[in-house]
Amino acid sequence: MQIRNCAIEDIEQVAVIFCEAYAAPPYNETWELANAHAYLQRFFEIDPANCFIAEENGEVTGALFSFSYPWHSGRLTCIQELFVSEACRKQGVARALIQSLKNGGAWLVAHKGSGAADFYQGMGFRTDGPYEFHYGAITS
């Protein structure tokens, strides 16, 4: 397995894996390929140096899209997306992608009760802390 920085031309292939990953439970999301491509490209453009892909025999097997910024305690990385093709899960791909981020702490959001949440806890991520995740409609 090889981990390398994502390039703009990789996003088309990565978007296919993204759509497949989020179509499965517990997400059950239906992404149009064009929307997935645009979504991932937008995050790529924010901080290309913090976007990585995993390859095996020249085929993309997973990707990580993140961005980092200065924080009171140093640099903080926000992992926006981490996904692995179904055929390559439980083979160390996600772990290798996370380990490509070598700059301190990271934040992320994970679906409760998902394999991803279990994976992050196994990597040492905690669900406690001083911040809560809030969401809702924006009203005028």
Image (tube, grey):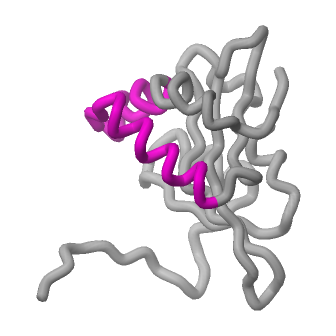
Which is more toward the observer, 130 or 41?
Answer: 41
In this rendering, would 55 be left or right of 19?
Answer: right
Q: Residue sitting at 65 percent across and 43 percent down? A: 64
The quadrant the N terminus occupies is top right
Which is more toward the observer, 71 or 131?
Answer: 71
Which is more toward the observer, 91 or 52?
Answer: 52
Tally of numbered discs: 0
In this rendering, would 128 be left or right of 31?
Answer: right
In the rendered image, residue 105 lying in the magenta stretch gets the answer no
Coordinates of residue 77 in the picture (x, y in percent): 70, 66
Coordinates of residue 116 in the picture (x, y in percent): 55, 44
Q: Residue sitting at 51 percent across and 26 percent down? A: 12
Q: Residue sitting at 70 percent across and 67 percent down? A: 68
The quadrant the C terminus occupies is bottom left
Q: Residue furthest left?
A: 140
Position of residue 92 relative to residue 128, above or below, is above
Position of residue 101 relative to residue 22, above or below, is below
Coordinates of residue 42 in the picture (x, y in percent): 49, 52
Position of residue 51 relative to residue 110, above or below, is above
Q: Residue sitting at 62 percent across and 48 percent down? A: 65
Query: Residue 137 lies in what quarter of the image?
Result: bottom left
Q: Main secondary structure of the magenta part?
A: helix
Q: Residue furthest right?
A: 102
Which is more toward the observer, 100 or 26?
Answer: 100
Range drawn in magenta: 17-46
In the rendered image, residue 37 lying in the magenta stretch gets the answer yes
Coordinates of residue 57 in the picture (x, y in percent): 78, 9
